[in-house]
Amino acid sequence: MDDKKVMISVKNLVKKYDDFIAVQGISFDVYENEIFGLLGPNGAGKTTTLEIIETLREKTSGEIFVDGLSVEKEANKIKQIIGVQLQAAGYYPNLNLVELMELFSGLYGVDIKPMEMLEKVNLQDKAKAKYKALSGGQKQRFSIATTLINSPKIIFLDEPTTGLDPQARRNLWDLITEIRNQGTTVVLTTHYMDEAEQLCDRVAFVERGEIIALDTPDNLIDQLVSSGFERKKEVKKANLEDVFINLTGKEWREDN
C-alpha cells in the first residue's frame, strides 16, 4: 500500500483534558480508497481522535494532514472534503427524509437531489416518512446518506451498526463496501471484531490513548496463530450469524 496516496496523516497526536491524557502521541496513515478501522474499548481515545481529524475538537499537540491540508490552518477546506455523520436528524423528528436532506444540503451549501441521495442507501421508498418513524437500521442508513451530501473524499463512521439486527448489519456492510468501491475513503470505529475483519483493509487497535497494533486483519490473526495461540473451540467455516442470514435471507426489510 506504500505506493498509494496518503489521505490522512496523523503524527504524534496528543490530547489532554486537564490531568487526563486521552490520546498519548499516536501516529498512523490512512490511504486513499481503503476502509480503515479504529478499534478499542470505550474510553480508549478512538472518538476523540476522529473528532480531532474532523476538525471538531482541538488537539493538544502533534500534526494532522487530511488530503495534504493542515487541521490547524485549513480546517474549512478539510470540512469541504470530508463527510461526518449528522446526528442532528434526531432533533427534527417530524421532518420527512426529503425535508431533512434539503435542510442538511443547505448547511453544506451544496445543491443535491434528495431522492438520488436516498436511493444510494435504499431509502427512496421512505422519502415521505418522518425520521422518527424509521427503524434503527433505516436511521443508520439515513445517517450514512448525510455523510455523502457534499460528495466527500473521506467519510467517518462512528460505530455504524451498533444495535442493529444481523440483516440490517450485513446490508450496512454491503453499503459501506459499495461507497468505498465508488472511490471514497472510509474511516470507521466499531466494537464488533467480525465487522472489522469483514470490512477493513487495515485496523489500528487503540488502548488507553495509544496504538498497540496496526496491520491488516489477516496479518494480525496470522501473527497471533504463529505465536502458538489456539482457539478453544474448533474453527468452523461459518458462524451462527451466517446460519441466521442463510435461513432468513438478506433482503431489505421494512423493520430494519
Image (cartoon, rainbow, N blue to C red):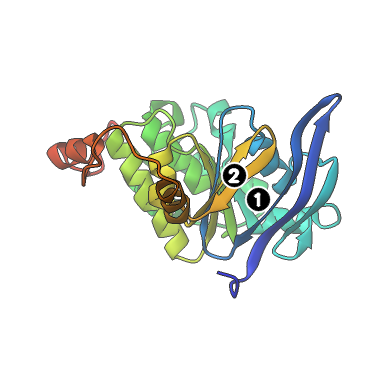
Q: Which residue is mark 1?
A: 108
Q: CA distance from mark 1 to mark 2?
A: 6 Å
Please give the name of the residue rendered at 42% of the width and 55% of the height, measured from the top-left corner. 218
Q: Which mark is residue 91?
A: none
Q: Which residue is mark 2?
A: 104
Residue type at the position of mark 1: Tyr
In the image, 56 versus 101, the foreground residue is: 56
Residue type at the position of mark 2: Phe
Is the residue 185 above or below the residue 208 in the image? Answer: below
Residue 115 spot, x, y in % from top left = 42, 52
Side (left or right) of 108 relative to 130: right
In the image, 37 versus 58, the foreground residue is: 37
Look at the image and tell me whether residue 104 can be seen: yes
Side (left or right) of 12 relative to 243: right
Residues packed near mark 1 inside 10 Å, few (<14), some (14 to 19) or many (20 plus): few
Give the secondary structure at mark 1: helix
Please give the name of the residue rendered at 59% of the width and 57% of the height, measured from the top-left corner. 154
Residues packed near mark 2 inside 10 Å, few (<14), some (14 to 19) or many (20 plus): many
Check whether the beta carbons of the residues at disc 1 and disc 2 lie within 8 A of each other.
yes
Please give the name of the residue rendered at 13% of the width and 38% of the height, measured from the top-left corner. 247
Give the secondary structure at mark 2: helix
Q: How many marks?
A: 2
Q: Name the residue furthest bottom.
A: 3
In the image, 216 versus 151, the foreground residue is: 216
Q: Quadrant of the C terminus?
A: top left
Figure quadrant of residue 158: top right
Figure quadrant of residue 81: bottom right
Side (left or right) of 153 relative to 119: right
Residue 237 spot, x, y in % from top left = 21, 47
Residue 111 spot, x, y in % from top left = 58, 57
Look at the image and tell me whether residue 148 can be seen: no
